[in-house]
């Protein structure tokens, strides 16, 4: 065992800020002294830069990833009586918005290797009421968008990509969020492109959908103080936009660092007994918002406890799949119905992952896992 252990956090926002502090502080001060805190040229600048980065024609900045998904569903007129297929192995925001517009979330199981939607089950779940599919590029790993778009196009169903955890990931060299009909992004601070507060964005190549989302995010206003439909207030603050515009320049470097860390973890953990490392699909290039392993044989809790004693903090995303959450009891899902995600929710553990994770910290994580597995398996 390592003697005097230092703590390795699961995530550390302060280091990223420290690296670009001068640039960010000056930009934030310029917004403060401009007196223009909502809207203005910085929002247009950020939207343009984000659209260019994704090679799409429209980007609409909004207040959060949750709002981005909500605005997408509203712009597609999805409402009561409609069904939207999605994964139960995601953050609640993905399905919450389906319920919020009055539609019904339809959960299908996931693939055990990628943690993403099982596309055969997606195809099998389509009914005449299905209006959209929301794939989540979970933990930064892209869904097989070629196969998914074939299914969706064959049935004329919209695809809203939940890119909250995957800004910068690609499928066949195209950025996620530019392949489906709409992409929804979160700038929550721990995301690959994280702001200093809440924020989100929507991408699309469809001018009508883009315009509709712009109207709905601004109270449904068509002309000043004229409203055709009920909207919401979902603006990205100017301060967040100026920070995100700076951070966007560094995103590819930060994602490359995450990839290096993931490769290192995979190299050293692939042969550790009782552990399954995450897999990438050949056409995908993931951005490792999380590096999530499976810990087999009901050893997760003891292993996590041992790791914590060794200074390594881990997280569980997600301990209970959405179809079994009390909030969805009226949908009538039963335990055992979606067995892969149910099993994985008992096994998954996310290791420390952020671009600034030092090689010493990575070593500590790897060493501790090797030690902890031996230790926990010895105490059977
Ligand atoms: C998969 C997924 N979808 C949606 C969201 C919602 O994003 P936000 O927190 O910005 O509302 C998150 C954020 O945690 C997420 O992880």
Image: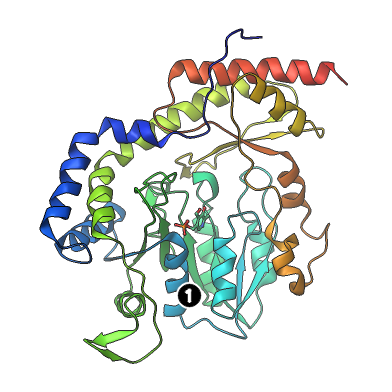
Image quarter in which the N terminus is found:
top right
Residue 211 in the image: above or below residue 189 = below
Q: Nearer the viewer, residue 262 or 152?
A: 262
Quick one: label 1, few (<14), some, or many (20+) residues within 10 Å?
A: many
- Residue 260: % across, % down: 44, 27
Does residue 166 appear to the left or right of 334 in the view shown?
Answer: left
- The residue at 53%/75% (across/down) is 157
Is residue 125 toward the left or the right of residue 174 in the image? Answer: right
- Residue at x-position 40% and y-position 37%: 13
Horizontal side, residue 309 vs residue 96: left or right: right
Q: Position of residue 63 (x, y in %)?
A: 37, 63
**Residue 135 placement: quadrant:** bottom right
- Residue 108's x, y, as percent? 69, 62
Above or below: residue 79 compared with residue 277: below
Q: Could you tell whether 213 is left or right of 267 in the image?
A: left
Question: Measuring 16% from the left and 65% from the top, which residue is drawn there?
Answer: 40
Which element is circle 1 on? helix
The residue pinned by badge 1 equals 73
């Amino acid at each position: 065992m390592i003697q005097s252990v230092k703590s390795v956090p699961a995530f550390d926002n302060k280091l990223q800020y420290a690296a670009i502090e001068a640039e960010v502080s000056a930009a934030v001060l310029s917004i403060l002294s401009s007196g223009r805190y909502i809207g203005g040229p910085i929002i247009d600048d950020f939207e343009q830069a984000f659209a260019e980065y994704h090679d799409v024609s429209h980007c609409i900045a909004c207040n959060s990833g949750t709002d981005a998904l909500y605005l997408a569903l509203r712009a597609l007129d999805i409402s009561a009586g409609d069904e939207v297929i999605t994964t139960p192995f995601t953050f609640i925001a993905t399905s919450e918005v389906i319920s919020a517009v009055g539609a019904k979330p339809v959960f299908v199981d996931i693939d055990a290797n990628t943690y993403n939607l099982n596309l055969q089950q997606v195809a099998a779940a389509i009914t005449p009421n299905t209006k959209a599919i929301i794939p989540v590029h979970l933990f930064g790993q892209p869904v097989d968008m070629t196969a998914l778009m074939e299914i969706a196009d064959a049935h004329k169903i919209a695809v809203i990509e939940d890119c909250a955890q995957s800004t910068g990931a690609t499928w066949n060299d195209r950025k996620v969020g530019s392949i489906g009909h709409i992409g929804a992004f979160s700038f929550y601070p721990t995301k690959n492109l994280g702001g200093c507060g809440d924020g989100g964005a929507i991408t699309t190549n469809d001018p009508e959908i883009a315009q509709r989302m712009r109207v709905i995010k601004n109270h449904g206003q068509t002309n000043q103080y004229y409203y055709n439909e009920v909207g919401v207030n979902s603006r990205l603050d100017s301060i967040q936009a100026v920070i995100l515009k700076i951070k966007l320049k560094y995103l590819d470097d930060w994602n490359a660092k995450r990839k290096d860390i993931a490769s290192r973890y995979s190299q050293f953990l692939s042969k550790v007994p009782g552990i399954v490392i995450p897999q990438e699909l050949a056409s995908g290039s993931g951005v490792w918002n999380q590096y999530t392993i499976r810990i087999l044989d009901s050893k997760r809790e003891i292993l996590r406890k041992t790791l914590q004693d060794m200074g390594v903090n881990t997280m569980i995303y997600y301990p209970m799949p959405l179809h079994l959450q009390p909030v969805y009891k009226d949908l009538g899902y039963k335990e055992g119905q979606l067995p892969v995600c149910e099993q994985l929710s008992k096994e998954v553990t996310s290791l420390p992952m952020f671009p600034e994770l030092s090689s010493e910290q990575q070593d500590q994580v790897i060493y501790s896992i090797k030690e902890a597995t031996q230790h926990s398996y010895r105490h059977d």
